[in-house]
């Protein structure tokens, strides 16, 4: 890899890993009989309400398990974008965040990468960080605006491909392309343009 090489950065949770599906399944196992299911990804600002503390405690319990992270299912939308990025000559690298005080997530994410090395490629590089804005790439593929907007602030020519989800459905920005599985040609076109900027 050279410094001028076109780099595409890929988030893990909600981008190439189906974090939401896995969390829903794990929360369902902890739900008491007759308890109403509460979707933590639909709460928005209401999620900060103390009445949902039990939900965050359950999620923290789930996320404390290394094997939960290691066995996250793949998220097809992110893989489709990665395939296009590779086909168009990008060097793909994983750039993911992990809870600061949760070593299980760090180890589990590494196990996940090793487990999927055949599809990712043996030469896949990865960075686990607390601040994505410090890392260079022409393109960032990420589902969460709270993580990719600081990255865009430092990259006037940067491009984000955002895999569609119900928790980012209302987000819009001219440098963010939503990918919902139906607009792969559009994604290919914009990442090709970003490659030559």
Image: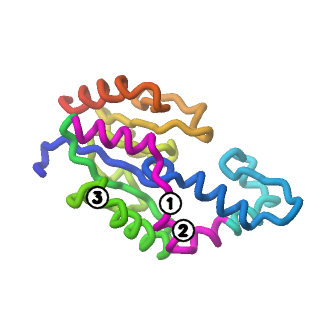
Which percent across, then down, holds residue 16? Answer: 43, 50
> Label 2: which residue?
68
Query: How many neighbours does mark 3 have within 10 angstroms: few (below 14), some (14-19), or many (20 or more)?
Result: few
Left or right of residue 21: residue 140: left
Q: In the displayed image of the protein, which residue is found farthest to the right?
A: 34
Tell me the CA gap for discs 3 and 1: 16 Å
Label 3 or label 1, whichever lies nearer to me, is: 3
Label 2, secondary structure: give it: helix
Res 111 seen here: yes
Q: Which secondary structure lies at badge 3?
A: helix
Magenta span: chief secondary structure: helix
Q: Name the side, left or right, on which 174 lies relative to 20.
A: left
Q: Is residue 86 magenta?
A: yes
Q: Residue at x 69, y 52 (%)?
A: 40
Q: Start and end of the magenta stretch?
A: 59-87
Q: Secondary structure at mark 1?
A: loop
Disc 3 or 1, which lies upstream in sequence?
1
Across and down, in percent, residue 158 comes to 32, 36
Residue located 50% across and 42% down the image: 145
In the figure, is residue 177 to the left or right of 83? right
Please provide percent x and percent y for residue 24. Answer: 66, 55
Residue at label 1? 72
Read off the residue under disc 3: 118
Q: Is residue 193 magenta?
A: no
| Camera-nearest residue between 100 and 92 | 92
């Amino acid at each position: 890899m050279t410094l001028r090489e076109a780099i595409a950065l890929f988030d893990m949770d909600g981008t190439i890993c189906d974090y939401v599906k896995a969390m829903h399944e794990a929360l369902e196992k902890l739900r008491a009989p007759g308890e109403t299911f509460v979707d933590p990804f639909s709460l928005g600002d209401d999620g900060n309400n103390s009445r949902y503390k039990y939900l965050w405690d359950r999620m923290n319990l789930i996320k404390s398990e290394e094997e939960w992270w290691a066995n996250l299912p793949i998220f097809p939308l992110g893989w489709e974008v990665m395939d296009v990025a590779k086909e168009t000559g990008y060097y793909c690298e994983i750039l993911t965040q992990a809870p600061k005080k949760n070593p299980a997530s760090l180890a589990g994410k590494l196990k996940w990468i090793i487990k999927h090395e055949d599809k990712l490629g043996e030469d896949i590089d990865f960075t686990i960080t607390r601040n994505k804005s410090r890392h260079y790439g022409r393109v960032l593929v990420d589902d969460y605006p709270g993580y990719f907007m600081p990255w865009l602030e430092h990259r006037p020519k940067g491009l984000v491909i955002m895999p569609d989800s119900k928790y980012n459905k209302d987000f819009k920005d001219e440098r963010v392309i939503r990918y919902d599985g139906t607009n792969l040609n559009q994604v290919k076109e914009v990442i090709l343009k970003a490659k030559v900027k």
